[in-house]
Amino acid sequence: MNIQWNKVTWYSKLIALVLFVALPFIGFYYGVQYGKLKASIGQETVAAITSPAITNNSTDAGATYYSNPAEWQVDANNTAGAFSIAYPIDFNYADNYPATPSTDWRVNANNVTGIKYFTLTIPSAFEPQTNLADATLTVGGSKNSAAIAECLTPDQSGGPATATSSVTIDGIPFVLSTFNSAGAGNLYATASYRTIHAGECYAIEYTIHSSQIANYPSSYNLQPFDASKISSLMQTIINTFKFQ
């Protein structure tokens, strides 16, 4: 048979009709198959990213870091140069204070002057979506005779103080007292570790600052922060304190 391609015949019309009817169905079929393949790949990708094993490993790694002072930053560049202390590297710190005495070297210094040597701040982001405002740790010292005389006495002006207890940090005995205070919807829980060393009163203190959840709209969905987690971390930091 001699087919003339440039001439319209009955069989060319038949072929065109078959293609006209069949092509949409063929395209629809392969489109569905492509969509299924793409969705399958997407699900596998999401599953890989949100794998419980990966999430748990990441969480465990973070928890291990905050409980392992051997991996922390060590600060010994304080004004006095008399001690060192370790801390997680992702927290803000300051150790470049002027040597001019001031009354903020410890909580409730009763207008007795001293020097603030070191400050570390744990931000609210450490406990997201909670009522934690911040937590601050300071190291201060004073050679003032009044500071030394009052060094181991708990502060009554900061609120009712608990009974003092004795703790040992790197072989040095400290007196520990704790107290709470509040104001304008804010809560402050303070722990003060004090000792007299080389003729100077040292105060290692941390204050956990939080806010009253009841003061926020329920739509904020704030949860109570983990007080034991913050206190435990602060105590771990304090236990790295060493006199040089």
Image (cartoon, rainbow, N blue to C red):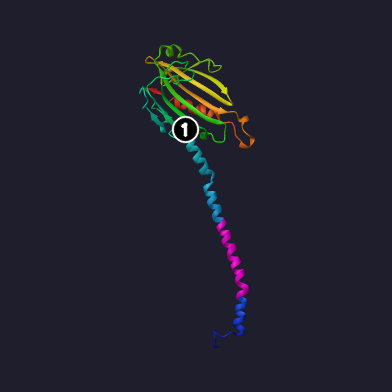
Q: Tell me if residue 77 is in the magenta stretch.
A: no
**Residue at the spot x=56%, y=21% of the render?**
181
Residue 236 at x, y = what percent?
A: 46, 27
Q: Amino acid at mark 1?
A: Tyr
Q: Quadrant of the C terminus?
A: top left
Instruction: Give the residue number, with chain letter if any, for mark 1.
Output: 66
Q: Quadrant of the N terminus?
A: bottom right
Query: Is residue 112 placed above or below 117 in the rendered structure?
Result: above
Kindly give the residue lying farthest to the bottom in the view shown: 2
Residue 5 at x, y = what percent?
A: 54, 84
Image position of 18 (left or right of 101): right
- Residue 100 occupies quadrant: top left
Q: Residues within 10 Å of mark 1 (few under 14, many from 20)?
A: some
Residue 23 at x, y = what percent?
A: 60, 71
**Residue at the spot x=49%, y=29% of the render?**
233
Q: In the structure shown, which secondary structural element does the residue marked by tag 1 occupy?
A: helix
**Main secondary structure along the magenta-highlighted residues:** helix
Give the residues drawn in magenta, as a range: 19-39
Q: Tell me if residue 22 is in the magenta stretch.
A: yes
Residue 87 appears anywhere in the view = no
